């Protein structure tokens, strides 16, 4: 059976590449620290020597729109193009092609269906920055096949925090059951408090630094009970109108299994708190 | 009222460099063109017409005027509403007033919503 070797959950900041590769005299003051933190985080993945990456993200109205909007979707293809014109325009993210793993996608899809998660699927999925940002930060070589899974954190009605956690549990089971000797890492991205297109956007901090600190503590402790008691769609909307990206952190805690994180780091940037978590399955902690 | 159709406008323009240029330079004629020949195309099957949506006068005016405050108040999706107008205004504001100046002006114009429940983006 396949072996889960690491679960990573982080924010995805689309400006990381641009912010850390522009001429040094034009860089923001935090750029060197940001780069150091991301490179340290990258090491938490590379030390586990993964063969396949199961990647959880959320399309930002690039391929998926309101005419046909799945709650959860899995990519099943040999390869995936990545980065849309408007992401190149706004964030300066280059185009990529990612290798897929059709066998694992097929197995994952069937397993999730068997576990009562009716995922939509796509045989021609173009990946957006929710999955390319973590490739840039934790696997810039882009040398591993991926199984992409998208969640709807964007177009209400959204599934409950509980459902996201349970989907994470089901993805974990599918990885554990996958008949292969491959080493699998699961990587998901989302947000802590975030405001986009509203009155609290682009402030000196994220829209709700108190929530950000609390969310980091919950994830660090793996305290799913506290999260499910305290986090609802209404509370997330009060934390910032795009805070629902936190649902992907909840999903990743489901993959890891409600345990304390083995690696935790964060960085207070303009308008957002960046956060980086890694869990190693306890029996294999390196 | 069609929040969906407003979002369809923002979505189709944001992803197309030619539409974005035309909407930037002459929003009044571009909105007319969009209503006549772009909006009615079914997404993903452009040979098929979709006849069920249209703008209200207020929606049309908000789009013609690049009025992102009115669009926010109508419940246009926050991500589309931000991204499209960044595409139009970020560069000129950057040259004139520095990084993030457009984004901060956008936020400043919405301050009256700060402690209120925002209009729903559900469609």
Image (cartoon, coloured by chain):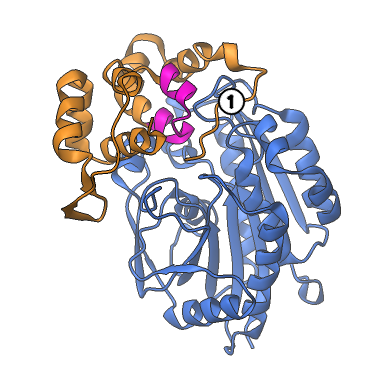
Chain colours: A blue, B orange
Seen at 70% across and 52% down, the residue is: A161
Tell me where residue A33 appears, x and y as whole percent.
61, 36
What residue did someone put label 1 on? Answer: B118
Residue A279 visible, this orientation: no
Q: Which residues are magenta?
A: B69-83
State whether the magenta stretch is mostly helix, strand or loop. Answer: helix
User: For residue A58: magenta?
Assistant: no
Instruction: Look at the numbered disc 1 and give the secondary structure of its residue.
Output: loop
Judged from this view, the residue extending furthest toward the front is: B52
Say left or right for A255 vs A186: right
B59 is higher (above) or lower (below) than A37:
above
Q: Chain of mark 1?
A: B
Seen at 80% across and 39% down, the residue is: A214
Q: Which residue occupies the foreground of this view, A60 or A219?
A: A60
Tell me where residue A29 appears, x and y as whole percent.
56, 25
Residue A273 visible, this orientation: yes
Q: Residues within 10 Å of mark 1 (few under 14, many from 20)?
A: some
Position of the C terminus of chain A, as image quadrant, is bottom right
Seen at 30% across and 39% down, the residue is: B53
Q: Which residue occupies the foreground of this view, A15 or A179?
A: A179
């Amino acid at each position: 059976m396949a072996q889960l070797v690491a679960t990573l959950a982080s924010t995805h900041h689309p400006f990381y590449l641009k912010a850390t590769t522009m001429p040094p005299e034009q860089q923001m003051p935090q750029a060197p620290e940001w780069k150091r933190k991301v490179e340290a985080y990258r090491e938490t993945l590379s030390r586990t020597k993964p063969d396949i990456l199961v990647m959880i993200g959320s399309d930002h109205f690039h391929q998926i729109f309101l005419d046909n909007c799945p709650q959860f979707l899995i990519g099943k293809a040999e390869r995936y193009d990545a980065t849309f014109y408007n992401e190149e325009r706004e964030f300066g993210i280059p185009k990529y092609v990612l290798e897929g793993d059709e066998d694992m996608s097929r197995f994952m899809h069937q397993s999730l269906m068997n576990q009562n998660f009716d995922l939509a699927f796509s045989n021609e999925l173009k990946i957006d920055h929710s999955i390319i940002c973590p490739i840039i930060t934790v696997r810039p070589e882009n040398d591993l096949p991926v199984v992409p899974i998208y969640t709807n954190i964007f177009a209400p009605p959204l599934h409950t925090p509980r459902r996201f956690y349970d989907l994470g549990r089901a993805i974990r089971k599918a990885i554990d059951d996958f008949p292969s000797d491959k080493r699998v890492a699961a990587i998901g991205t989302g947000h802590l408090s975030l405001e986009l297109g509203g009155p609290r956007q682009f402030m000196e901090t994220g829209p709700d630094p108190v929530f950000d600190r609390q969310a980091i503590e919950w994830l660090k402790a793996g305290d799913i009970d506290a999260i499910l008691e305290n986090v609802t769609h209404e509370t997330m909307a009060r934390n910032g109108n795009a805070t629902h990206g936190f649902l992907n952190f909840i999903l990743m805690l489901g993959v890891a299994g409600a345990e304390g994180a083995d690696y935790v780091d964060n960085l207070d940037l303009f308008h957002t708190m960046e956060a980086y978590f890694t869990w190693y399955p306890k029996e294999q902690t390196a | 009222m069609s929040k969906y159709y407003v979002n369809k406008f923002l979505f189709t323009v944001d992803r197309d460099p030619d539409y974005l240029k035309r909407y930037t330079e002459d929003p009044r004629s571009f909105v007319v063109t969009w209503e006549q020949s772009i909006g009615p195309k079914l997404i993903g099957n452009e040979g098929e017409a979709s006849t069920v949506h249209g703008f209200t006068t207020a929606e049309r005016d908000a789009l013609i005027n690049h009025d992102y405050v009115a669009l926010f108040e109508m419940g246009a999706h926050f991500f589309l509403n931000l991204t499209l107008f960044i595409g139009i205004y970020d560069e000129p504001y950057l040259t004139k007033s520095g990084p993030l100046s457009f984004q901060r002006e956008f936020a400043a114009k919405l301050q009256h919503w700060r402690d209120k429940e925002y209009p729903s983006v559900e469609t």
